[in-house]
Amino acid sequence: MTALSRRQFLRSSAMLAAMAGVPALVRAKGPIALRVASSMPTNDNASLHVWYEHFAANLKGAVGDAIKLDYFPNGQLGKESDVVQQVKIGSTDMMVSGASIWATVAPELGMLDLGYLFTGFDHVHRALSGPAGSKLNELLQRHSGCSILAWAPQFGGRNVYTKKPVHSLAEIKGVKLRVLPAPAYIETFKAMGAVPTPISFGEIYMAVQTGVVEGLEHDSATVLASKFYEVVKSCWQTQHAFGPMVAVMGKRGLAKVPAELKSAFMKAAQDATEQQRPIAAHKEQAANEALKQHGMSFYPMAQNERDLVHGKLQDTAYRNFAAKYPVTAPLFADIAAAAKS
């Protein structure tokens, strides 16, 4: 018999240790299978995929084979709006996505997409680790029965990518840009003078390539992972949004996780977020450098123009949003306070 290598021995030992913590009744019933969906490809520059990989490894280390994850990346289960409904009814158990899409069922979450609400992902983490994050999760549960297991950073703030160079608000005026199909994104780009055009993620490449739109807005790592650099060559660094990603489960999905494993399950998700936080900024910098190698040019947004758009949004979009959804009014204050803490 061939002797076990040190790596094989350690892997086997870790598995036995994990299984020792799983109740015998759970093991006797066999593994629990959970369907997990994501719109992004299996790529190290795709924030959703990297978070999922951490989560899957953490869960395996904690419960062994008691829970089996069936992963469907790259939009295999359909458009994100369709998968939201699947998670609600329980045909899909879990979705890893940007928070934005969940505003389609809990519109209050749309506040997170309003331009210049956050200064960066450290600000996002401070804000959503407190009362604001808890309240938004409560609202999602009330509207849909779904729960946020974890908030996590994407790989950088969102910028504007176009076929032709854009350097200013004057040059973005009238430019058709693909935006997320979320009201807050539409309001943000109207404030900039662009023509926001909602298009689902899976249709972005073709829409830009065929001229349906003249550009898009997204983070650098996603532009790299999805090869959008093949159809856009100019980046205007607006840093207009720092929308978090979320891991969301429906009521039926959560009910599949045995009570005795739920704590380990939730900890695996929280730990995945903590693992993602330190690498997010590095991923953005590395993606920018890689995009330059693919011919992308970068143009910073002038601070006075950023301040101008921020002020306009505070006076209109923020105020209108809080009036339409009064429960969010104190959350705007909480988020602003977190910027200074």
Image (cartoon, grey):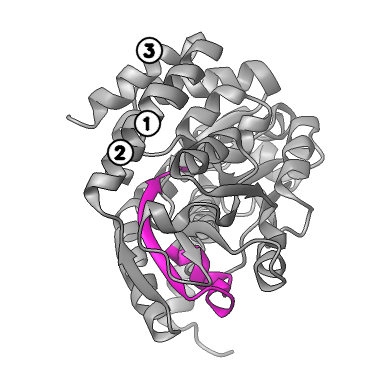
Query: Is 58 contained in the magenta span?
Result: no
Residue under the point 32% across and 66% down = 299
Up/down of 305 relative to 320, above or below: below
Judging depth in this view, the residue of 134 and 196 nearest the camera is: 196
Coordinates of residue 71 in the picture (x, y in percent): 68, 57
Residue bearing the label numbered 3: 330
- Mark earlier in primary sequence (3, 1): 1
**What amino acid type should be assigned to the residue bearing mark 2?**
Leu
Q: Secondary structure at mark 3?
A: helix
Up/down of 68 relative to 244, above or below: below
CA distance for labels 1 and 2: 6 Å
**What amino acid type should be assigned to the residue bearing mark 3?**
Pro
Residue under the point 30% across and 38% down = 308
**What amino acid type should be assigned to the residue bearing mark 1?**
Lys
CA distance for labels 3 and 1: 20 Å
**Range of magenta residues:** 220-244
- Classify mark 1: residues with Cα within 10 Å, few (<14), some (14-19) or many (20+): some
